[in-house]
Image: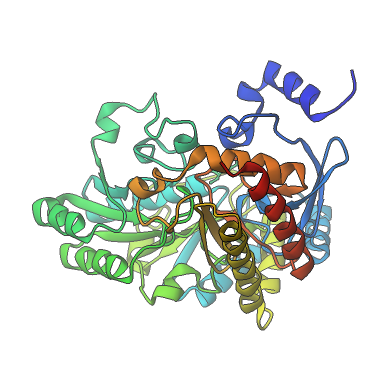
């Protein structure tokens, strides 16, 4: 049998549920065959059939400096040559912790883990251990990984597959999760009024990126901070996606708000499995071996992953890095909106730093309910038309897109050319 995307997908489905190791990759929402990728270079990925695509997924965010960035790859090679894993402390972990604390001022202590799911799950456990309370507040459409208590009205793949609340989560576990509406200040205030003393933590994505991209209002972010302070609850910013994506100090730097705990992932591993959670010293002091909250991991702080992360974080500290990234991303979203207008398509787009949202709706949404008003079928048609023209967007209307520093004017021009044809072809 010839090796092509189709035959690989058929083969994958025999031994891997749905043929993929993470649900959104299966193209179920958009239909068709997932591209099996062979390699990446800069702004582009190449599939099993040799087709090249300008990549706006960037491994779902981590590759802020592009694919196979030579400096990052060299750091990985060097670290790998010294040993793949020790399960013992290394100096590079201290370097990473010190750097994170320096760049994100709300971090006084951090612990390294291997995935964003682990980071958020552990941050919540610490918040509960610290406060002695059980309830947590999350917001509809926000995704914080796939730990049980967080898979309630979640975004990302859960939303894409129409299962925002997962089977297999005991009702008793979900009962401690209060789900509110993103950007709804009145509801948040009323919830604290009624249950403030039992709330351990409020967790949210300070720019939501798992129900497409949704910005919070400044008022909403400030209110969450004030209510948590007043009621002794822990404010957790899930910056797994926004950390080092929207700016050097994350979304908290943009909003000027200091959360009690922050979760990080994606960019801090530069494409390798690395994540972190951290924040106030008194809260982090509750973690074993200092305190009674248990958390551990064989591969936590893995030396190869830390090397990739340190190299990536070195690149993003170059003067003007985020200005250039933001301006490229903005050129993309403004160009797409302009092109859609030319074809009279109901469309809008926006970006924050190196992440963006595109919406088949005239205004960017501000809540999950508004995200649901986007024309999903129009997105799916556009997605396939672009893919055929060598542009790879996330295969779901509910995911944010990502630009890297390897994307430049040539990529934006080629993307807008493809969009011109795609809007013309798919508009109804
Ligand atoms: N949950 C990720 C997007 N928000 C998708 C991860 C993947 O499929 O690799």
Residue drawn 46% across the image and 68% down it:
251
Q: Quadrant of the N terminus?
A: top right
Q: Is residue 355 left or right of residue 208?
A: right
User: Is residue 55 visible from the viewing direction of this image?
Assistant: no
Q: Residue furthest bottom?
A: 319
Image position, residue 373 (x, y; %): 39, 44
Please tell me in which quadrant of the rendered image residue 338 appears: bottom right
Image position, residue 425 (x, y; %): 67, 44
405, above or below 78, in the image = below
Disc tally is 0
Q: Quadrant of the C terminus?
A: top right
Using the image as rendered, state which of residue 328 and residue 191 is in the foreground: 328
Q: Is residue 305 left or right of residue 167?
A: right
Residue drawn 32% across the image and 49% down it:
139
41, above or below 382, in the image = below
Using the image as rendered, state which of residue 128 and residue 2 is in the foreground: 2
249, above or below 426, in the image = below
Where ligand 1 lies, by quadrant?
Answer: top right
Using the image as rendered, state which of residue 130 and residue 141 is in the foreground: 141
Q: Is residue 116 left or right of residue 43?
A: left
Using the image as rendered, state which of residue 390 and residue 267 is in the foreground: 390
Q: How is the image coloured?
A: rainbow
Please tell me in which quadrant of the rendered image residue 404 appears: bottom right
Image position, residue 12 (x, y; %): 72, 23
Residue drawn 20% across the image and 62% down it:
232
User: Is residue 145 visible from the viewing direction of this image?
Assistant: yes
Please tell me in which quadrant of the rendered image residue 341 appears: bottom right
Image position, residue 58 (x, y; %): 67, 53
């Amino acid at each position: 049998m010839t090796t092509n995307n189709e035959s690989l997908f058929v083969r994958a489905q025999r031994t891997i549920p749905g043929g993929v190791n993470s649900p959104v990759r299966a193209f179920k929402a958009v239909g068709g065959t997932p591209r099996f990728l062979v390699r990446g270079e800069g702004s582009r990925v190449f599939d099993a059939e040799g087709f090249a695509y300008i990549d706006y997924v960037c491994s779902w965010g981590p590759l802020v400096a592009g694919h196979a960035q030579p400096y990052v790859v060299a750091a990985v090679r060097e670290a790998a040559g010294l040993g793949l894993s020790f399960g013992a402390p290394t100096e590079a972990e201290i370097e990473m912790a010190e750097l994170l604390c320096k760049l994100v001022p709300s971090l006084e202590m951090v612990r390294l883990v291997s995935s964003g799911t682990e980071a958020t799950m552990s941050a919540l456990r610490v918040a509960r251990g610290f406060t002695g309370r059980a309830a947590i507040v999350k917001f509809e459409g926000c995704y914080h990984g796939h730990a049980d208590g967080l898979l309630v009205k979640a975004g990302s793949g859960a939303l894409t597959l129409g299962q925002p609340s997962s089977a297999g989560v005991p009702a008793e576990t979900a009962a401690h999760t209060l789900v509110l509406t993103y950007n709804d200040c009145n509801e948040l205030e009323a919830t604290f009024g009624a249950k403030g003393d039992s709330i351990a933590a409020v967790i949210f994505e300070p720019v939501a990126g798992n129900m497409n991209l949704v910005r919070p209002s400044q008022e909403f972010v400030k209110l969450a901070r004030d209510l948590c302070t007043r009621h002794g609850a822990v404010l957790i910013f899930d910056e797994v996606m926004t950390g080092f994506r929207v700016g050097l100090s994350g979304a908290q730097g943009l909003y000027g708000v200091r959360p009690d705990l922050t979760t990080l992932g994606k960019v801090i591993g530069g494409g390798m499995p690395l994540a972190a959670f951290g924040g106030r010293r008194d809260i982090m002091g509750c973690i074993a071996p200092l305190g009674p909250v248990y958390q551990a991991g064989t591969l936590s702080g893995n030396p190869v992953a830390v090397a990739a992360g340190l190299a990536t974080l070195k690149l993003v500290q170059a003067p003007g890095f985020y200005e250039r990234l933001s301006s490229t991303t903005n050129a993309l979203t403004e160009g797409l909106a302009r092109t859609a207008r030319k074809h009279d398509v109901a469309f809008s787009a926006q970006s924050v730093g190196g992440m963006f949202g595109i919406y088949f709706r005239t205004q960017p949404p501000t809540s999950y309910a508004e995200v649901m008003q986007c024309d999903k079928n129009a997105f799916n048609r556009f997605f396939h038309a672009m893919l055929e023209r060598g542009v790879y967007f996330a295969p779901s209307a509910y995911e944010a897109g990502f630009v890297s520093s390897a994307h430049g004017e040539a990529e934006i021009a080629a993307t807008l050319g493809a969009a011109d044809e795609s809007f013309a072809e798919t508009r109804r």
